[in-house]
Image (cartoon, rainbow, N blue to C red):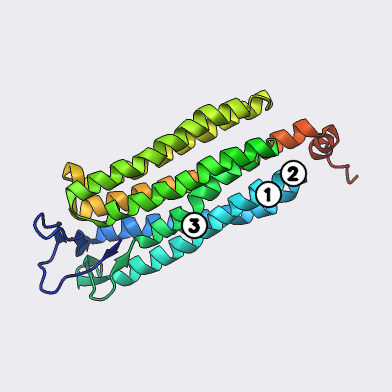
């Protein structure tokens, strides 16, 4: 979503006109609101970058058949880090300090004229990373080729459709349109949950018990973090708008992204380690034995 400053608008949060159906424009943030968004975007960027490096560094610590899942997980975090850099720069450029008070601290930050804050980067990020998240989930289990192919053909198109259908509702201020696009986006979301909780569970019955527990954790983590997005999406529909809603949305999206990508990637690594140890006693022995004494 690109938030633009309309000419001659009053200072403050300009809500969407029910007659004109304009996208909501947040023109003014307090110093505390600006710093909160600035810091949460910075945190998300750092977390994505650090997790990318970690996952690539530990790839040799699993058997070759599971390394693809770790590489894809690192790709997810790298793509997210890039887009958070763009979001961070867009936000920093969009709002400038005005009304500097005592002791030299800006009282408010106003949206400058021009392109404004481009939140569309989030949807580009999700369109790329959500299918990859589902791909790494299937890849780390090393299922038979036919089963793996069947699951991927169900999950990846549905995930892309979910993001594509959600975007028009995100950028419109028409409450009826937002509700329609939100409902349409929910259909593939529910289908993805069905595949993850029913079909994937059926396909993964041959996995070690500990892997089954970790897989359950992965699915519940996705459900919990993905649940943040429709809640933030529905803010205008429940009457929550303006600068506070804008700040809450940035916090919610950013924290959900960190959990759904960084923490999710670490759990993928844990599953890959468990399966590597279970598949090869030699690998397990080499990974767990103590290093020789230097004495």
Give 93 or 35, whichever is nearer the viewer.
93
SS at badge 2: helix
At 33% from the left and 57% from the top, the residue drawn is 37
Whether residue 269 sits left or right of residue 46 in the image: it is right
CB-based contact (under 8 Å), mark 2 and mark 1: yes
Q: Which mark is residue 68?
A: 1
Question: What label does residue 234 carry, if any?
Answer: none
> Where on the picture, by quarter, is residue 213?
top right
10 Å crowding of disc 1: few (<14), some (14-19), many (20+) = some
Marks 2/1: CA–CA distance = 7 Å
Taking the image as shown, residue 230 lies to the left or right of residue 63, namely: left
Asked if residue 192 is positioned above or below residue 163 in the image, the reply reads above
Q: Residues within 10 Å of mark 2 (few under 14, many from 20)?
A: few
The picture places residue 131, in percent across and down from the top left corner, at 51, 48
Q: Nearer the viewer, residue 117 or 230?
A: 230
Residue 267, visible in the rendered structure: no
Side of 267 relative to 229 (left or right): right
Which secondary structure, mark 1? Answer: helix
Q: Quadrant of the N terminus?
A: bottom left
Residue at horizontal 32%, vertical 59%?
35
**Res. 3 image quadrant:** bottom left
Q: Which mark is residue 65?
A: 2
Residue 171 coordinates in the image, percent (x, y): 27, 57
Identify the mark nearer the N-term, 1 or 3.
Answer: 1
Residue found 62% across the figure and 29% down from its top: 203
Mark 3 neighbour class, 10 Å CA radius: few under 14, some 14 to 19, many 20 or more: many
Q: Which residue is mark 3?
A: 80
Residue 136 position in % (x across, y down): 60, 45
Q: Is residue 170 visible?
A: yes
* Front one among 137 and 47: 137
Q: Secondary structure at mark 3?
A: helix
């Amino acid at each position: 979503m690109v938030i633009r400053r309309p000419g001659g608008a009053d200072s403050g949060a300009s809500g969407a006109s029910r007659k004109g159906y304009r996208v909501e424009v947040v023109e003014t943030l307090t110093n505390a609101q600006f710093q909160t968004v600035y810091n949460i975007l910075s945190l998300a960027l750092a977390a994505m970058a650090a997790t990318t490096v970690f996952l690539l560094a530990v790839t040799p610590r699993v058997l070759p058949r599971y390394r693809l899942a770790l590489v894809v997980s690192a790709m997810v975090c790298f793509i997210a880090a890039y887009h958070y850099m763009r979001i961070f720069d867009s936000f920093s450029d969009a709002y400038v300090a005005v009304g500097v008070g005592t002791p030299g601290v800006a009282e408010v930050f106003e949206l400058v004229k021009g392109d404004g804050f481009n939140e569309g980067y989030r949807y580009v990020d999700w369109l790329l990373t959500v299918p990859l998240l589902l791909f790494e989930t299937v890849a780390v289990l090393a299922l038979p080729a036919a089963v793996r192919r069947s699951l991927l053909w169900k999950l990846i198109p549905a995930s892309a459709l979910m993001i594509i259908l959600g975007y028009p509702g995100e950028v419109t201020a028409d409450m009826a349109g937002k509700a329609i696009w939100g409902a349409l986006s929910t259909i593939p979301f529910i289908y993805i949950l069905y595949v993850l909780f029913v079909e994937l569970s059926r396909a993964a019955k041959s996995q070690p018990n500990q892997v089954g527990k970790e897989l359950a954790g992965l699915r519940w983590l996705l459900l919990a973090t993905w649940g943040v997005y429709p809640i933030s999406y529905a803010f205008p529909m429940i009457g929550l708008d303006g600068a506070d809603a804008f700040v809450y949305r940035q916090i919610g999206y950013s924290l959900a992204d960190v959990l759904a990508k960084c923490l999710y990637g670490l759990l993928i690594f844990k599953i890959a380690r468990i399966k590597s140890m279970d598949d090869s006693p030699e690998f397990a022995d080499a990974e767990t034995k103590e290093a020789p004494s230097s004495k």
